Image: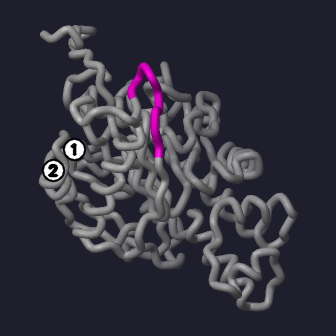
Amino acid sequence: MSVCQKQRKGLIVENKFVVSLDVGGTKKLAAVVNSTDGIISRLKKQTPEAPTHESFSGSLVELTNEVIQLSGIQPEQVASIAVGIPGSVNMETGIIGMAPNLGLKNYSVQEHLNKRLPYPVLIENDVNLAAAGELAFGAAKGKQNVLVVFVGTGIGGGLILNNKLYRGSGWVAGEIGHINVHEKGPKCGCGRIGCFEALASRTAVVRQITAEIKKGKQSVLKERTEKNKDIKSKAIARALEAGDKLTVKVINQACKTIGRTLAGINNLLNLELIILGGGLMEASESYMLPKINETFYKYSIGDAAKCVSLVGTNLRDDAAIYGGITLTEELLNIKV
């Protein structure tokens, strides 16, 4: 064992770093991180719309190389590349089964990245990665049974049972965004009707606000829709702060849908903590979290409600970044 390595609790400890990539429907985050120094460099870029397999993997390779260069570390100090994908991911094969908000399906992303990067590449669902980060470094630390829910472009979940990340029999546990909550609801990106994320994600909120403006309803967001500008989470938060009646109405309905759906999940699993994050939640947490709580406890079974708390994420955008450390330790047996 070299002088820069030592043994700790069965893990090989090395002076290395993880490059974590958190790929969202609208943005990609990259950071170089370890448990000693924290995040030493980070980059944020837009996720390309309707990427091809080649352009998607190419953008991740480019982002990886850029953030490593920015950090100033040497290539031999990179322990792994941990990639969080917003969709179902088979960790044995490295195949993205379905990622509706990226427009990708049945794609061997790990194989493509391994061919272009000289580092071990690890693939995980993005909210699973965030849940792993919260468990080791954030609000879920020391907890046994936790659900992490991110509300952004879509809605995803990461489930911790008995202090361990639960991935399910086919690697798709936590895909709560595709629970059917309205049999006559809008069409989801997955192709089905009435999915949770089709009614309560930022995409759903923007679609509803835009539709109402086209019908003649007034809103401070009207100018953005007329100029075909994207309505981001921060714009929605500003509209809420301004008391925009249309935005308040749509967000209130989304909060009811979120609260009711999470109550059903908690009635099944009897959790002790539900952590809420993601772009929309983080931008409007002070408004949305109390509204979600109100509906959640209304629909929760009494004894189940007594055990659980709903809180915002401690790590925010960095949850999945820190999750890359946990994933590396789990799969490569390296303490970073």
Residue 324 in picture, x, y percent from top left: 35, 36
For residue 112, which numbered disc appears in the image?
Answer: none
In which quadrant of the rendered image does the N terminus lie? top left
Circles 1, 2 touching at the beta carbon (< 8 Å) = yes
- The secondary structure type at the circle numbered 1 is strand
State the image quarter where residue 255 is shown. Answer: bottom right
The residue at the point 56 percent across, 63 percent down is 201
9 or 309, nearer to the observer: 9
Q: Does 307 appear above or below 203?
A: above
x and y percentages locating residue 206 in the rendered image:
63, 73
How crowded pointer 2 is (Cα within 10 Å; few <14, some 14-19, many 20+) is rated as some
Is 91 on the left or on the right of 197, as rendered? Answer: left
Find residue 174 and report its horizontal and vertical position in percent.
39, 48
What residue type is disc 1 on?
Val
SS category of the residue bearing label 2: helix
Reading the chain from its start, which is encountered first: label 1 or label 2?
A: 2
Q: Which residue is mark 2?
A: 114
Query: Type of residue at label 2?
Result: Asn
Q: Most prominent secondary structure in the magenta stretch?
A: strand
Mark linked to residue 121: 1
Q: Nearer the viewer, residue 182 or 316?
A: 316
Q: Residue furthest right?
A: 243
Q: Is residue 166 above or below residue 247?
A: above
In the rendered image, the vertical position of residue 130 relative to residue 326, given as above or below: below
Q: What residue span does the magenta drawing correspond to?
A: 34-42
Quadrant including the C terminus? top left
Residue nearest the viewer, comparing 99 with 292: 99
Residue 18 appears left or right of 289:
left
Residue 216 visible in the snapshot: yes
